[in-house]
Image: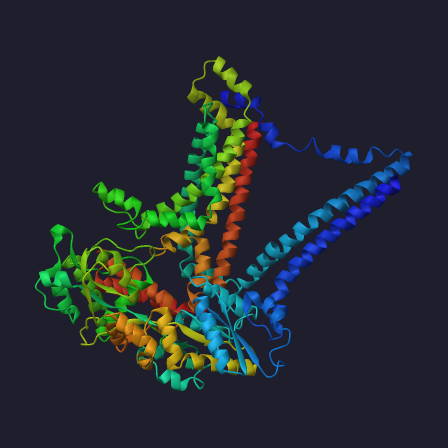
Amino acid sequence: MAESQAVQAGPGRRWVQPRSSIEPKLDRDAVRPIRLPPLRRFRARIRARGRLWATAYAFVLPAFALTALFSIVPLFMVIRRSLYRGNIFDTDLTFAGLRNYKALFAAGGGHSLVVTATYTIGFVLVSLVAGMGIAFLLDLPLPGLKAVRALFIIPLVVPAVATAFIWFILFQPQTGLFNRILTGAGLPQVTLDNPTVAMVAIIGFGAWQFFGEVVILFLAALKTLPNDVIEASIVDGATGWQQLRYIRLPLLRPQTALITVISTLTGLQAFTQIFVLTNGGPDGATQTALYYVYNQAFGLGAAGSIGIADAMAVLLFVISILVTIAQVVIVGRAARAVS
Amino acid sequence: MLKRTVGRGKRTVWGAVGISLVAVLVAACGSSGNEAASSDQSAPGGSSSSAASESTPSSSESSGGTVEITYWSSSSQAEIDYLDSHFNDSHPGIKVTGQYVASADNTTAKVVAALKSNTEPNVLLGQDPSNLPLYAQSGKALDLTEALKTETDALYPGIKSGLFYQGKQLGFALGGVGNYVLFYNKDDFAKAGIAGPPTTWKQLSEDAVKLTDAAKNHFGIYIPLGSSEWISYVWESLLWGNGGSLLNQDGTKVAFDSQAGIDALTTWYNLVQKDKAAPTTSFAQGGSFDGAPAFASGAVSMIVEGQWALADFKDINYGVALMPAGTSGKSSAGIGIGVATAFDTGNDAQNKAAQEFIKWLGQPEQGAYLTSVSGGLPSAPAQLDQDLVKKQIAAQPTYSTFAAQLEFGQVRPTIPGYAAISQALSDNIDKALRGKLTPEQAIKAAAETANAALANAGS
């Protein structure tokens, strides 16, 4: 088909297998200057390689130790704690097996997972479509566009709490900008007390904050697209839309898949804007799984359950892993389709 | 050549291992430092524990019999300095040191973390008694019943109940409490020919209808809309005014699903939905659901508000009155208090000193000081006779009414499930006020959610 043919010549390969040509060279370079009899040379090479490995691992060790101390160990602590009942101070721990996981669903946890799914789907769609669209626009050869690019980084670098608070003010009844415009136009007001508005607001904020990253990634990917293929298609009389549909988008498929994985993981971890904008309300309509964890652990005081909070954290972890694996498989397939 | 390479290689390896060891050690020290510092009880006091132990090299007992204790406060540094110097000057055997901790939502997490890692202060000047059950779970909250009996009996009666949990007194109410009263627009009342503020909700409803001018988008009263603690907090005054109560005798189930509760919500429901005498859009602003802008802008003629709103209302010719009475004929209002809690650090001398410090804070002079610097209300009637509070009474015409309302006030119940009960209430009250549920349905739904939360509480 035209699609796969066009793709054949593409440089997607470069992206798929970038490292294979670099690694062996390193080893050889390190050993080559030493000229010795064959056996000694072999031993020296082993030793040299061993030294190289030891040095390399020694440099990796601090990062690994810190990861183990602050990520892996706490992860197992959370998994273990999710199997126990008791207060937050662990003064009355009793083994509960999987009862916390059951209690989680009785205490509104299922609803918060549905909210998380809704949010993540909305978030990924909006940031991908907006990010990709703007990346295509910024890729156009127009004067002054380079200066505009920086604007899309602003939401990324400003602290989320500060920008979320600006959104909060925008949604204020009577006085917020949105509602002044709406009342001015004779329309009913929108406030975060409305479940739909609240959901749209947190998706909007999340996507607005994140899509700059998507723009950068897509823009970088667009810059690597081969000009010859596109020029050839122009010679063949392809319209702009045909170029986009049959050449650029298929060539971008591996990057698109990767960006989808990143966006999904970001979406699953939404918290800040919910904390600032809605507090999970109204009536739990924006209580995502992560906010649920916070609420059970700290928000509800003594009425919350740290066991349920940990169970939800573990559940969210498992879901994230599963979603990532599923998406990585899709990325692999997409990559293979290209090469 | 080879040797040199080997040597360099080795050095590189050991250098890298060395760097990583240092990094790991630094990380390990960072994580265990707090525990190490607090295992000897010389330096309790959270994040700055290591600094504290450095600045006080001799341990608390050995320095000439002086017991050193710390407390956490979210008030100003000036207040901390005042308390430190005045207490230490009058108590030669004890040295208190106040530490400022930021207020807002994350204080709870901070205190929990400190209690878990044994770095808690001896005394916490907290803002919220609803955390007392949580602190009780740590097993470290000291029972103040004996030490503070006189001071506690001197408090306003409605405040006292909030300090006890499971039969133990875990907190003491500091000066500077808050409540709410009814604000009314004198000009609007004069125009409508109404002589004075209503004294019952029945009368208030009639007045509100008279004051409403639908054509001009003007309403008689603002009933708070939205999902927030403020909504249930104000609504509770109607429940109590109707003779109802939030919980049953032993606190195991809610009791607001009574006729008193249904009547209370019906009063609000009718004002908003039936009589259209209250706005149907929220005037919440900046996370405050009291709706102050509604009254400040003249959109409504009455509102239930606290002292903090006075500055917003400076352009309005208003008066204040006690909360209208319910069907029981009594007025009632919620009271918000800050509490001092003492934590057991396993050191008797420190525990005694901590209680002594709270006792001192409970004297009328200190109570009046805290009341005046906070701009709030006295926690005990005796503070009204102190000069500092007298000055406030003279400066604020509304102060006496607010203080009088304290006699008919109640604090939120101190139980683990209160946050959940309040949330269930405000969610369903809001649904009723927006016409999605009848008052009966809303109260029933709130009671079901709240009872489920109560049953699960603390598991």
User: In the picture provided, is B317 more to the left or to the right than B102?
Assistant: left
Quick one: B187 or B114, which is closer to the camera?
B187
Quick one: B79 or A131, which is closer to the camera?
B79
Q: Quadrant of the N terminus of chain B?
A: top right
Q: Is residue B81 visible?
A: yes
Q: Position of residue B435 (x, y in %)?
A: 21, 56
Q: Is residue B256 visible?
A: no
Q: Position of residue B199 (x, y in %)?
A: 16, 72
Q: Position of residue A339 (x, y in %)?
A: 58, 27
Q: Position of residue B402 (x, y in %)?
A: 26, 72
Instruction: Give the residue at the far right of this rendering.
Output: A37
Name which quarter of the figure residue B365 lies in: bottom left
Q: How many numbered marks, from 0 up?
A: 0
Quick one: A163 or A189, which is closer to the camera?
A163
For residue A305, above or below residue B5: below
Tell me the residue at 42%/78% (across/down): B361
How has the structure been colored for display? rainbow
Quick one: A219 or A153, which is closer to the camera?
A153
User: In the picture provided, is B52 more to the left or to the right than A218?
Assistant: right
For residue B203, above or below residue B164: above
Name which quarter of the figure residue B441 lies in: bottom left
User: In the picture provided, is B30 more to the left or to the right than B159?
Assistant: right
User: In the picture provided, is B103 more to the left or to the right than B317?
Assistant: right
